[in-house]
Amino acid sequence: MTEKSFPSPYALEPAEGGEGWKDLYAYNLVFQENRREVEESKFWFCDSQHWPTVTKPFETIGFEFAVSCLGQYNSRHLLIPPANGIEFRIHNGYVFMSPVGVAPDEIAARVPQFMQRAGHYFQNWDTLLERWKGKIHSTIEELNALSFEALPDAVDIDDVLSGKGTGPNDDLMNTFDKLISLAFRAWQYHFEFLNLGYVAYLDFFTYCTEVFPGIPDQAVAKMVQGVDMELFRPDDELKKLAKLAIELHLTGHFGNTADPDATLAAIGAAPGGSAWLAAWEEAKDPWFNFTVGNGFYAHDKYWMDYLELPLGYIGDYISRLELGENIDRPVAELIVERDRITEEYSELLSPEQLEAFQGKLGLARQVYPYVENHNFYIEHWTMGVFWRKARQLSNMLHEQGFWANPNDMFYLRRDEVREALFDYVTGWAVGAPAIGPDYWPAEIARRTVIIDALSKQRPQPALNTPPAVITEPFTLMLWGITSDQIANWLGDSDAPEGEFRGMAASSGIAEGPARVISSSDQLSEVQVGDILVAPVTAPSWGPIFGKIRATVTDIGGMMSHAAIVCREYGMPAVTGTGTASAEITTGQWLRVDGNTGRVTIIDAPVVAEPALASSHA
């Protein structure tokens, strides 16, 4: 392994105009000067898989709650023997992480405790998971019930005569506190099962590497593929609606879906339109609580709030169906391949090994769907409601003069929002103007300049000196941070010019023109036959997967969302290339080898051929 190091966070200056960025974030989220020796002794990697863009001050709630709760379940609930939590910091606006290991002499003592705690969940998985869904639904209902309204000129007379004793100011402050606490509760639920899903798969994976020396990672992954996942349900609902539109002869209404109200009104007025609209309404709740982002940013667009998005996807599916294409995921083929590979490897085992293998495989298959399904319930549905309520609060305070634009609240930390709220209710209570309208507009303008400046500069992939070998299993499995990946980042790769190496995340080989996408706003640019190249993809990009030939990402391991989704769509993929999206340009002809993890820039054929893709174990 190279002795090269990444820069120290203390030596990296922000982009011009980004000076003073540390003041935007809480003290515990930035590298403090008096902790330099401690912080420089750790290896930090940029989690651009979950936070690919600069995080505004209020948006830190996403990684603070997510990573805190991840650690809580590893370290305090389950006592996972080799893994504690993950430390996190903001640097120049981007999120960096450093896994916290377990001291070798403490691992053995955690094993029996882990077996008792995790074993209870594994033995009662279906019952506990059904209970989990009830808890999530209740949390979402509580979030939906919240409302942020401007304070009235006077307390309602009934509240006075009943002796209630408190006013709407009390309700407003409590509603904000509840908004935050419900989000924190939801993120605890998120990790109640997630890490167990990873542990079960990791246990199966580790056993396979022991009894099948040299087995490809892909072969292990394929033994659990082809399962029914709720994460794909939103996309499946769109496909059903596209097929229904054809059946009811409504296809002419999907030529221009930019105005959802006009489109839906025209459909409703057409023969058969009411039946289609009934199916549309049934699909909307809950399946349109789906974001084209990842749920961690206030600006993420949710289908429920931007109905032109699902309508546009339906229109695209209609066009492809009319051309005779099959738009369904190849589930049957995935299952045939899964069973074939499982059988081939099973035949190599002794009876004792086979029993252990089948037990571990059965558990992995049982828990595997949750690894993706939780995404819909938390990142998409819960966080969609959370951001909707937060925007309502921001707009209410905007109307009270606290800031110039409806969504400016997200430039404040959540503790500052509570201060602004108290300022508002105090001004209301004493009958004098609040201070916020004279303070926040200028301060938000200053912060906007800083955030915009930080956004113009790509983050370092990592900070400080990397370890000789990456061994922490979750870092390898989820983020694809391997020793080879680090060598790529440091420029020590032995890959020839024009070749990128990463994780062989989903098998198959494909060639085609690159389509480099840096945000979900560019999805409309994707053309049939493109190879998608992006820093990271989102599970909700499913509607474009039928168009493209392969996927290439900068970050992500075998169990990253991009890898799992691509396998379930039968799509060749290479994840964790490090720099592909920055060095490849749209239009370059690529060969993506999802079997070896290599992406190569090649000369385009004189005549572009139809999709060349194959899949093998």
Image (tube, grey):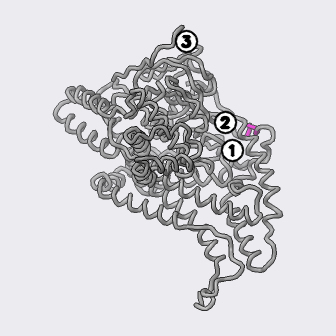
Say whether marks 2 and 3 touch (CB < 8 Å): no
Q: Which of 342 and 455 is in front in this view?
A: 455
The amino acid type, in three-letter code, at marker 2 is: Pro
Q: Residue at 70% across / 82% down in the picture?
A: 154
Query: Looking at the figure, which quarter contains the C terminus?
Result: top left
Q: Magenta segment, which residues?
A: 10-14
Say whether marks 1 and 2 touch (CB < 8 Å): yes
Distance from disc 1 to disc 2, alpha carbons, whole Å, reads 9 Å
Q: Is residue 299 left or right of residue 290?
A: right
Say whether marks 3 and 1 touch (CB < 8 Å): no
Q: Residue at 41% across / 43% down in the picture?
A: 241
Inspect this view and state whether residue 44 appears: no
Rendered location of residue 591, percent (x, y): 50, 17
Distance from disc 3 to disc 1, alpha carbons, whole Å, reads 38 Å
Query: Looking at the figure, which quarter contains the N terminus?
Result: top right
Q: In this view, does 421 lie above or below 598?
A: below
Q: Which of marks 1 and 2 is nearer the N terminus?
A: 1
Q: Which mark is residue 459?
A: 2
Quadrant housing residue 568: top left
Q: Residue at 70% across / 68% down in the picture?
A: 421
Residue of label 1? 93
Q: In this view, does 509 lie above or below 543?
A: above
The amino acid type, in three-letter code, at marker 1 is: Gly
Q: Residue 604 carries which label?
A: 3
Q: Residue at 42% across / 30% down in the picture?
A: 322
